[in-house]
Amino acid sequence: MPKRVISGTVIKKAGDKTATVLVERKVLHPRYHKTVKRFKKYLVHDERNEANVGDTVSAIECRPLSKNKAFRLLEIVERGEG
């Protein structure tokens, strides 16, 4: 089974080697047929502490590293301001 790859924005540095990534997706509302945004936050393992708040990153699914952390940082797509 292929690993899921997510991309989103780092919104928080949550402790050592961990970043919180906000992933936004657009879905069609079933009744009103309008595109609406849905958000989800993931904890991503950042081994070298290289991601900062505001960066756009890509993460890949891995084995569970803690209770809530099951993604590893794949690459930093774009650096944010700051």
Image (cartoon, rainbow, N blue to C red):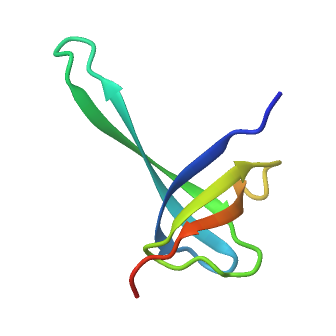
Between 80 and 67, the residue placed more toward the observer is: 80
Residue 80 at x, y = what percent? 44, 76
Vertical position of residue 57 compared to residue 64: above or below: below
Query: Above or below — where is 49 with respect to 55?
Result: below
Q: Residue at image x 70%, y 71%?
A: 46
Residue 72 percent location from the top left of the image: 73, 59
Q: Is residue 8 visible?
A: yes
Residue 79, given in percent of the width and then of the height, sits at 50, 76
Q: Residue at x 57, y 62 (%)?
A: 57
Quarter of the image that includes the N terminus: top right
Based on the displayed image, in which of its 4 quarters is residue 51 positioned? bottom right
Picture residue at 79% right of the left edge, 49% below the top? 62
Horizontal and vertical percent for residue 37?
Answer: 30, 38
Return the residue nearer the eye: 35 or 19.
35
Toward the left, the furthest residue is 32
The residue lying furthest to the top in this view is: 31
Q: Is residue 69 visible?
A: no
